Amino acid sequence: MAAPPISRWGHAWRIGLALMISLIAWAPLVGHQWEHARWWFWLDLALGVLSFVLVRWRRRFPVAVAVTTNVLAGFSMTSGGPATWALFSLSTRRRWREIIPVSAVGAVAGASFILFADPTQDGRELMLVDIALLATIIAITVGWGMFVGSRRELMATLRDRAETAESEQAARVARARIAERARIAREMHDVLAHRISIVTMHAGALSYRDDLSPDEVKATAATIEQSSRLALVELREVLGVLREGTGDAEPEPPQPTAAAIPDLIEHFRGTGMNLVADVSVDADAVPSAIGRTAYRVVQEGLTNAGKHAPRTRVEVHVSGGPDTGLSIEVTNRLPAGTRPAEPLPASGLGLVGLTERAELAGGWLRRLTTADRHVLRVWLPWAA
């Protein structure tokens, strides 16, 4: 783990603390050096300056700098601050294979100075006290450094987790946005496709039939007007969910369930579709979860029949129960004769959406075309 950058204030207080440690360690010896061995005074000071220079590279070469400064501390009391600083920096790495040897070097260098080089010692008892103090300082330095290193690792881990959580949240938002767009697209197709198909079918009848009576033309135009008006209303309801402010749109109406299938069938009959329906299931008993899917299946099947096989016979069969599940079959004969010069576009998005709906509900959708008819079969489990 890379150590975090240090600010100017961080550098300042570290240098100040190292200087204070060096001065405290040098204070008992500086008078003796100046009076009896002035060369030692200047050597001690020079080695201390060298240690302060070396400690600048403690992060790039942690082991080398720590070993060098601790060895110099065995000859120079002014090197005590940089040696402590380098040992502390090394301990933040929390690697025992580095900490133990360097700590041993520091302890041996310090004990050697106390036993052989310090002329201020007056007895063996004071030497043992100084050695114990030296061991305590090394232990505190190592422990404090490992604590700081552990805290750095913890903060880095928390930072990584926060960044990971943010990226995962962004991914979830993106997936939710895509899913919502797909849902809106399916809803727009479900609520508008059959309306537009009815409008197109009747408009096509007006353009191809020239033997209609005025009353028939008027009735067809009224159907086109009604279907267009309903399409606009449903489009406004669907687009309401796209607005940012919740107050800009009316609350979304309840989604139709299986209980609305008879009304849907009557609506298609009212548009002139040759429709035979057999709904042998208690629509009110169908669970709402699969009832919504069943409604969309019947709606899409009748819409496709009116779009691609107008004026043919369409059959709808809805049956099932709690033990067998819900079965839906929409069948229409293939149109005979010449197709229109410009057939309606077959996007296939409606059946794709129905397949997704059926699979999400735990069921399946099958579509097949025989020699004379097109069959759409859907089975849905009867959820509790």
Image (cartoon, rainbow, N blue to C red):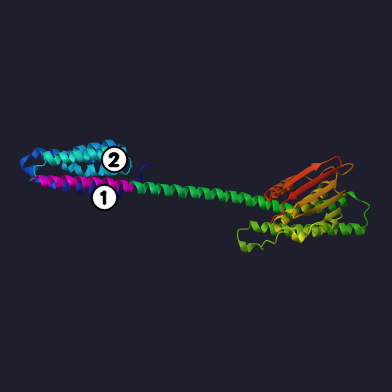
Q: Is residue 373 left or right of residue 169?
A: right
Work out whether residue 98 can be spotted. yes
**Could you tell me residue 52's position as x and y percent?**
22, 41
Task: Answer whether residue 245 is magenta in the image.
Answer: no
On whether residue 146 falls in the magenta region, the answer is: yes
Query: How far is disc 2 from disc 1 in space, using C-alphas?
Result: 24 Å
* Residue found farthest to the front: 323
Which class describes the residues within 10 Å of circle 1: few (<14), some (14-19), or many (20+)? few
Q: Nearer the viewer, mark 2 or mark 1?
A: 2
Which amino acid does the dot numbered 1 rest on?
Trp
Q: Residue shown at 76%/61% (left/top)?
A: 284
| Residue 288 on image: x %, y % | 71, 58
How many dots with numbers? 2
Q: Of helix, strand and loop, which mostly describes the magenta segment? A: helix
* Residue at x 63% of width, y 58% of height: 243
**Disc 1 secondary structure class:** helix
Give the camera-side residue of 142 and 343. 142
Which is nearer the N-term, disc 2 or disc 1? 1
- Where's the N terminus, which quadrant? top left
Query: Circle 1 sits on which residue?
Result: 13
Expressed as whole percent of the image width and height from the top left, the position of residue 202 reads 85, 53
Q: The disc labelled 2 sits on which kind of residue?
A: Ile
60 left or right of 46 in image: right
Residue 259's place in the image compared with 178, above or below, is: below
Q: Is residue 64 above or below residue 180?
A: above
Q: Quadrant of residue 50?
A: top left
- Report the span colored magenta: 123-148
Tell me the element at label 2: helix
User: Considering depth in this image, is 4 or 140 the residue closer to the camera?
Assistant: 140
* Mark 2 residue crowding within 10 angstroms, few (<14) / some (14–19) / many (20+): many
Label 2, on which residue?
A: 99
Q: Residue 53 appears in which quarter of the rendering?
A: top left
